[in-house]
Image (cartoon, rainbow, N blue to C red):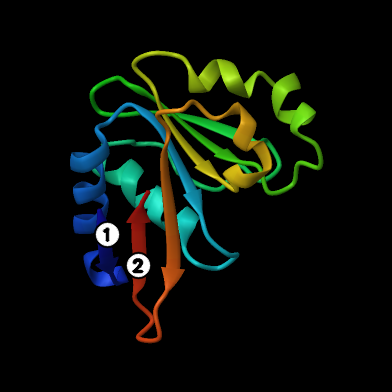
């Protein structure tokens, strides 16, 4: 699946992604700094009906939210970890394999061996027009 979107239609793109992936499991977002991973995850959370303020868990590594349906939503940012052991020590793998949850991961490259085989790998890139292209691999 491939989506192209701008800020004007980001909510529609987030909804389409969730229709494709479902509202549970692991979504691993790949892309360079500034591509809009956090912005897109914020919009995914809005579509899911999360009422909390959604921001990047850069220092905490994980933020927990709840969807309107009561499903736990975990937002990870592994940009600052130096070794995979840091993610192991904080119990990240337990989150990834917990049923009836959604895990949204920024910078998954740093913890790839921990990801479940059925994780949705999503790449994001900025197009010359300024729009974003999202591909689910």
Circle nearer the N terminus (1, 2): 1
| Helix, strand or loop at mark 2 | strand
* Residue named by callout 2: 133
Task: Identify the disc placed on residue 2.
Answer: 1
When the figure is inspected, residue 110 is found, relative to residue 33, above or below; the finding is above
Measuring 62% from the left and 46% from the top, which residue is drawn there? 109
Residue at position x 37%, y 48% in the image: 137
| Residues tagged 1 and 2 counted as in contact (Cβ below 8 A) | yes
Residue 103 image offset from top left, x and y in percent: 45, 31
- Measured from the top left, where is residue 135 in percent x and y? 35, 57
**Residue at x 25% of width, y 53% of height:** 1
Q: Position of residue 73 (x, y in %)?
A: 41, 29
Q: Is residue 10 above or below residue 87?
A: below
Q: Which mark is residue 49?
A: none
Q: Name the one closer to the observer, 78 or 56.
A: 78
Task: Decide if residue 90 is on the left or right side of residue 11.
Answer: right
Which quarter of the picture shows residue 48? top left
Residue 37 at what x, y percent from top left?
47, 56
Count the marks: how many?
Answer: 2
């Amino acid at each position: 699946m491939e989506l192209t979107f701008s800020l004007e239609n980001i909510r529609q793109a987030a909804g389409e992604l969730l229709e494709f992936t479902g509202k549970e499991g692991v979504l691993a977002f790949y892309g360079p700094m500034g591509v809009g991973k956090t912005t897109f995850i914020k919009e995914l959370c809005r579509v899911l009906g999360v009422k909390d303020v959604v921001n990047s868990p850069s220092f905490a590594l994980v933020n927990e939210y709840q969807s309107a349906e009561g499903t736990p939503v975990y937002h990870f940012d592994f940009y600052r970890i130096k070794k995979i052991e840091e993610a192991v020590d904080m119990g990240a793998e337990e989150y990834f394999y917990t049923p009836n949850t959604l895990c949204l991961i920024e910078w998954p490259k740093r913890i790839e061996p921990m990801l479940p085989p059925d994780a949705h790998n999503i790449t994001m890139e900025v197009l010359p027009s300024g729009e974003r292209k999202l591909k689910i691999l």
